[in-house]
Image (cartoon, rainbow, N blue to C red):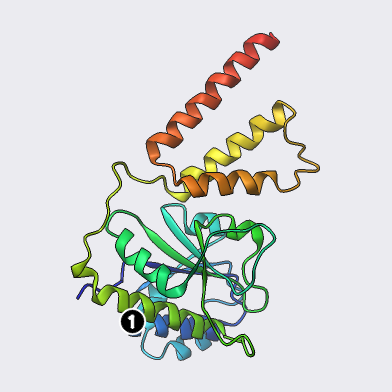
Amino acid sequence: MSEPSDIRIVLVETSHPGNIGAAARAMKTMGLGELVLVNPKDYPCVEATARAAGADDVLANARVVDSLAAAIADCQLTFGATARLRSLRWPVVTVREAAGMAITERQSSKVAVVFGRERTGLSNDELALCQKLLNIPVNPAFSSLNLAAAVQVVCYELRIAALGDAVHEPERPEEEYAPAGMIDSFHAQLERDLVDIGFLDPDNPRQLPLKLRRLFIKARPTINEIKIMRGILKGLSRKRNATDA
């Protein structure tokens, strides 16, 4: 059996340190150990250590970063956990489907699962950084599931999927998928260029930036494809500057 220890769990702006400790415990019981915290409200904290109940090593090795973009910059496949439908539709998979995909793709890609704030979850902008949305199919009549419990469910499904990964031959891409940090940098350049040519109004962008991100998320570009796109933008910018001169 192969442990799912190389799959990253990301917690965004966790309010209660006890939830961090409980999430660490949930991770360790299922063989995961890579935890990244985005702007936790109160951490490190003795309550987190107490709730970890022996998973102190997961907390000791946890990284704290200041943005979700930084937390997943090196990831090629990111799942954003959400309980609600959004106005801008993203591909949604069940936790079981996500686990199967994660275990298959971890052979060639860095995979992360992102959990949002206890009360409000992940924002649309944060979900836009994820390739897919992950949904736990709970009882619709009582859908309350706390953060640590959600992490436990996801980690359990990852472990169950990992139990059978020896019988699945992972599908390897011909080229390595572009990590999130590279794609984010490309989008920043694209948006600047669209503003420069008057196609994007920065004061009233509507949903255009999110829809452009969605377009490239569906395509899952490789590193080489992003380099080609950036080269095209650079060439167009040079030509535009030469014409203006």
Residue 241 in the image: state x and y as whole percent.
64, 15
What residue lies at 71% left-to-right and 25% top-to-bottom?
A: 197
Image check: 135 left or right of 204?
left
- Give the percent coordinates (x, y) of residue 175: 31, 41
> Residue placed at 52% from the left, 44% from the top?
216
Circle 1 crowding by C-alpha within 10 Å: few under 14, some 14–19, many from 20: many
- Report the number of numbered marks: 1
User: Of residues 239 and 96, which is closer to you in this image?
Assistant: 96
Residue designated by label 1: 30
Quadrant location, the N terminus: bottom left
Q: Is residue 3 above or below residue 193?
A: below
Q: 174 or 201: which is nearer to us?
A: 174
- Of all residues, the one furthest to the right in this rendering is 203
**Does residue 134 lie above or below 18 as drawn?**
above
Rendering coords of residue 63 (x, y %): 45, 66
Q: What residue type is labelled 1?
A: Met
Q: In this view, does 204 lie to the left or right of 124?
A: right
Taking the spot 53% from the left edge, 38% from the top edge, the residue there is 186
Image quarter of residue 205: top right
User: Where the C terminus falls, by quadrant?
Assistant: top right
**Image point (59%, 75%), residue name:** 14
**Could you tell whether 171 is left or right of 203 in the image?**
left
Q: Position of residue 154 (x, y in %)?
A: 43, 77
Badge 1 marks a residue whose secondary structure is: loop
